[in-house]
Amino acid sequence: MADKDTIGIASDHAGYELKSALKAELGGLGFAALDLGTESGEKSVDYPDFARALAEAMKAGKFSRGVLICGTGIGIGMAANRHAWIRCGVVHDETSARLTRQHNDANVMAVGQRLIGVETAKASLKVFLSTPYEGGRHVQRVAKLA
Ligand code: RB5
């Protein structure tokens, strides 16, 4: 059983600064952040490697929810969704954060450091972590993702 108080987080170099900000925000919200890299905004890396690191740690039961950051959130979100146990929604604001939880039962959110501001990202993270899945009409659709 995954530890519900731990949230996995990872980024490429283009998401490194926002990853640092969101890690601090997780602490403020009462969660432990398990940081799976990258370790610098200076060294160019490949976002699929960090999506995979988060996916494998989730599969191993280290956490059940995660946050991924790259320049746009799009590439790292695509990479995350190659892993069958991940439902990653790219989040741009509080509304998309709420809806990907309510409708898609997303277990990972992806954000783009180059696209949204840090305060919007923090607010979106808070909504993502506090919004329950609605179930109901969405259950059959989410099941088909698997
Ligand atoms: C890195 O330059 C950038 O391409 C990557 O962070 C991401 O935005 C891709 O989707």
Image (cartoon, helix red, strand yellow):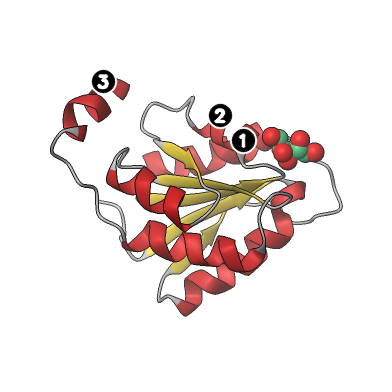
Mark 1, residue position: 74
Q: Secondary structure at mark 2?
A: helix
Within 10 Å of disc 3 (Cα), the crowding (few <14, some 14-19, many 20+) is few
Kind of residue sitting beneath label 3: Lys
Query: Distance between the Cα atoms at labels 2 and 1?
Result: 6 Å
Within 10 Å of disc 2 (Cα), the crowding (few <14, some 14-19, many 20+) is some
Mark 2–mark 1 CB contact (< 8 Å): yes
Mark 2, residue position: 78
Relative to 6, 70 lies left or right: right
User: Of callouts 3 and 1, which one flags the residue occurring earlier in the amino acid sequence?
Assistant: 1
Mark 3, residue position: 144
Relative to 42, 136 lies left or right: left
Within 10 Å of disc 1 (Cα), the crowding (few <14, some 14-19, many 20+) is some
Residue 60 in sight? no
Q: Position of residue 84 (x, y in %)?
A: 38, 26
Q: What residue is drawn where x is 30% and y is 42%?
A: 105
Relative to 57, 49 lies left or right: right
User: Of callouts 2 and 3, which one flags the residue occurring earlier in the amino acid sequence?
Assistant: 2
Mark 3–mark 1 CB contact (< 8 Å): no
